[in-house]
Amino acid sequence: MFTPSCGIRVYLALGDTDMRKAINGLSILVEGKLALDPFSGHLFVFTNRRRNILKVLYWDRNGFCLWQKRLEKYRFRWPEPEDEVAEIDGRELLWLLEGLDLRKTQGHGALSYTALS
């Protein structure tokens, strides 16, 4: 499995996506419906209506990659659509893949210091 590195953003395409779509169809959705750059190197995550399939699309230097996970018994805890797209961080993507509900799961927040005192 891949883990998003520092600086890589993760975007969830909220709602349902036709999982028959492959790289070309999903990249068109990223650019058109989500108004984002599919060549950015960020991760774009899609799910189907049954919430048992996830697809992750991303650009890797010289070509697109498409990663898929299909659950045989359970369902992904997909956020309800309020907008077309939601941004999460890499650890939240890992939580989602593990079956955790992002609305109920919350880790420690990031800290930023400007000086030592």
Image: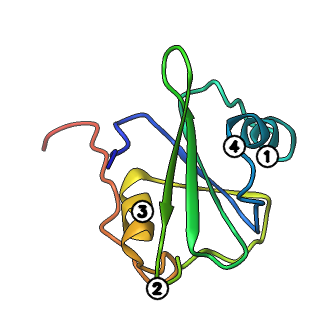
Q: What is the secondary structure assignment of the residue under circle 2?
A: loop
Q: What residue type is labelled 4?
A: Ala
Say which label, 4 or 1, has the lower sequence index: 4
Q: What residue type is labelled 3?
A: Glu
Say which label, 2 or 4, has the lower sequence index: 4
Q: Which of marks 4 and 1 is in front?
A: 4
Q: What residue type is labelled 2?
A: Lys
Residue 15 vertical placement versus 26 (above, below): below
Q: Which of marks 3 and 2 is in front?
A: 2
Closer to the camera in the image, 41 or 27: 27
Q: What is the secondary structure assignment of the residue under circle 1?
A: loop
Q: What is the secondary structure assignment of the residue under circle 3?
A: helix
Kindly check if marks 1 and 3 are in contact, taking CB atoms under 8 A apart as contact. Answer: no
Q: Position of residue 24 (x, y in %)?
A: 75, 34
Instruction: Give the numbered dot on residue 22.
Output: 4
How many callouts does the rendering have?
Answer: 4
Instruction: Give the numbered dot on residue 73.
Output: 2
Q: Where is residue 75 in the image (x, y as percent from the top left)?
A: 53, 82
Instruction: Give the numbered dot on residue 92.
Output: 3
Say which label, 3 or 4, has the lower sequence index: 4
- Categorize mark 3 by other alpha carbons within 10 Å: few (<14), some (14-19), many (20+): some
